[in-house]
């Protein structure tokens, strides 16, 4: 079966997001470029799928665009920020657990990459870019903010507080693994489908950044 994709169109960037595979989302200057990059990243996303005990189908890079959304300033900044109609679909218990397992796998993959990365990462062409520990801290801060969107209020753990990080992740995973009627999980919050995708995308985006910037 073809992979269902949502296209989010900003004025500067376009995102292509695999609706049923949380974390597999890439951007480009055009829809065609975003889809091409999404296909290229199937090989990088596959280890995450394996960590979740799943497997990408052979037809994974055959895409079917099921929805196109108008993006906003967040889209142009580099964030898949819009909730698709497909993200409001009912979520069964089995599918919720599958999606939560992919988020958990994204965390495990991020931890593996962080452990293998040097503390100081190669800078960008203009000297920008966070080093490893700053990236870890940024990801944890974002996850605390994201957790508020699904009804969880926690303080941000320190990057070396393994117990607190695991406790936060367990709470998030428990919410994402529960069946849902497709409504936001709290007033002005996120749906379970969109939340899983957003959590996993952000974690993997920075895991791949660390990998790329660790190279000489």
Image (cartoon, rainbow, N blue to C red):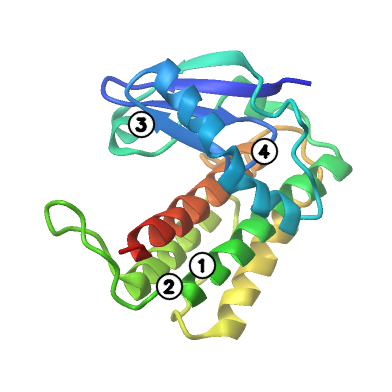
- For the residues labelled 3 and 1, the Cα–Cα distance comes to 26 Å
Closer to us: 138 or 62: 62
Residue drawn at point x = 33 percent, y = 22 percent: 10
2 vs 4, front mark? 2
Q: At which x and y percent is residue 31?
A: 42, 17
4 vs 1, front mark? 1
Q: Are marks 3 and 1 in contact (CB under 8 Å)?
A: no
Tag 3, which secondary structure?
helix
Q: At which x and y percent is residue 169?
A: 63, 67
Q: Is residue 169 above or below residue 147?
A: below
Q: Is residue 125 left or right of residue 152?
A: left
Residue drawn at point x = 69 percent, y = 68 percent: 170
Q: Are marks 2 and 1 in contact (CB under 8 Å)?
A: yes
Disc 4: which residue: 21
- For the residues labelled 4 and 1, the Cα–Cα distance comes to 20 Å
3 vs 1, front mark? 1
- For the residues labelled 2 and 4, the Cα–Cα distance comes to 26 Å
Tag 4, which secondary structure?
loop
**Mark 2 or mark 4, which has the lower sequence index?**
4
Q: Is residue 128 left or right of residue 99?
A: left
Disc 3: which residue: 75
Q: Is residue 152 above or below residue 197?
A: below
Q: Is residue 204 above or below residue 184?
A: below
Disc 1: which residue: 113
Q: At which x and y percent is residue 137?
A: 39, 71
* Residue neighbourhood size for the residue with mark 1, other residues' Cα within 10 Å, grouped as few (<14), some (14–19), many (≥20): many
* Residue neighbourhood size for the residue with mark 3, other residues' Cα within 10 Å, grouped as few (<14), some (14–19), many (≥20): many
Disc 2: which residue: 117
**Mark 4 or mark 3, which has the lower sequence index?**
4
């Amino acid at each position: 079966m073809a992979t269902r994709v949502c296209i989010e169109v900003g004025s500067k960037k376009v995102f292509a997001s695999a609706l049923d595979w949380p974390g597999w989302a890439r951007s480009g200057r055009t829809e065609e470029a975003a889809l091409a990059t999404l296909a290229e990243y199937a090989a990088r996303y596959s280890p995450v799928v394996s960590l979740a005990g799943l497997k990408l189908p052979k037809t994974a890079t055959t895409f079917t665009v099921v929805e196109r959304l108008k993006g906003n300033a967040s889209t142009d900044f580099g964030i898949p920020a819009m909730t698709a109609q497909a993200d409001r679909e009912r979520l069964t218990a089995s599918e919720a657990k599958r999606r939560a397992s992919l988020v958990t796998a994204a965390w495990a993959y991020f931890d593996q990459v962080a452990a293998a990365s040097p503390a100081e990462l190669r800078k960008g062409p203009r000297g920008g870019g966070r080093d490893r520990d700053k990236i870890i801290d940024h990801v944890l801060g974002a996850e605390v903010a994201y957790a508020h969107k699904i009804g969880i209020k926690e303080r941000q753990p320190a990057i070396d507080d393994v117990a607190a990080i695991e406790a936060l992740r367990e709470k998030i995973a428990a919410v994402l693994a529960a069946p849902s009627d497709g409504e936001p999980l709290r007033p002005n919050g996120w749906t379970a489908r969109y939340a899983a995708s957003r959590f996993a995308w952000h974690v993997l985006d920075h895991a791949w950044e660390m990998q790329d910037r660790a190279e000489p």
